Amino acid sequence: MNVCETTRNVNQEARPKSSGDEDQFFDYFFGSHHRPPMMPAEKGWHPAADLFETSTHIVVVIDIAGIDVNDVNLELEKGILKLSGVRREALEEQKRQYHKMEVPYGPFERALRLPCAVRGNKVTADYRGGLLTVRLEKQEKPLKVQRKIILHIQ
């Protein structure tokens, strides 16, 4: 076995070969449970995100593995949670010869409309294991002011 060969998923064995990432996007849009690692954006890339609610909170989980917390901005304004920042490529003296490059580098942004009003002063953000988890306490009246959210790293 060649060192550069990768193992394929059993479900992919019967599929015809394609030229690239379109399979991943096609599968995602037509019902696959696996989403692409990134979706292109007008300004950089969009990190993958999950948004769900509990009885008391709206919870957003965003995949930003490998990103320094100092390179991340998180804001809440008028019911929209905005995340932006940059993933910096490690600078090395030695040039790399890529066979496939799927990890996006450079600026990113994501804006998520929240399904209900939240308390702007009751927001926590935790960055652990490459996942940013933002917990926003629900409230009855909409938030009308902008707030910057401070990230806590553990």
Image: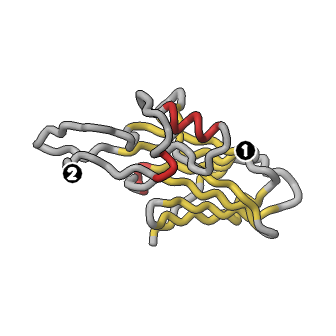
Q: Residue at x 63, y 41 (%)?
A: 111
Image spot of residue 92 (x, y percent): 16, 45
State the image quarter where residue 110 is shown.
top right
Q: How is the image coloured?
A: secondary structure
Describe residue 80's horizontal placement relative to residue 25 as left or right. Answer: right
Q: CA distance from mark 1 to mark 2?
A: 48 Å
Residue 1's tag is: 2
Identify which amino acid the numbered label 1 is placed on: Arg
Instruction: Tell me the quadrant of the picture where the C terminus can be found.
Output: bottom left
Residue 113's tag is: 1
Describe residue 86's horizontal placement relative to residue 2 as left or right. Answer: right
Describe residue 83's horizontal placement relative to residue 77 as left or right. Answer: left
Q: Is residue 30 visible?
A: yes
For numbered disc 2, what is the local secondary structure? loop
State the image quarter where residue 55 is shown.
bottom right
Image spot of residue 123 (x, y percent): 66, 63
Image spot of residue 108 (x, y percent): 48, 39
Classify 10 Å Cα crowding around label 2: few (below 14), some (14-19), many (20 and above).
few
Nearer-the-camera pick, 78 or 31: 31
Q: Residue at x 26, y 37 (%)?
A: 99
Identify which amino acid the numbered label 2 is placed on: Met
Single out the mark in the foreground, 1 or 2. 2
| Residue 129 vertical position relative to residue 16 in the rendered view, above or below | below
For numbered disc 1, what is the local secondary structure? strand
Q: Residue at x 51, y 35 (%)?
A: 23
Classify 10 Å Cα crowding around label 1: few (below 14), some (14-19), many (20 and above).
few
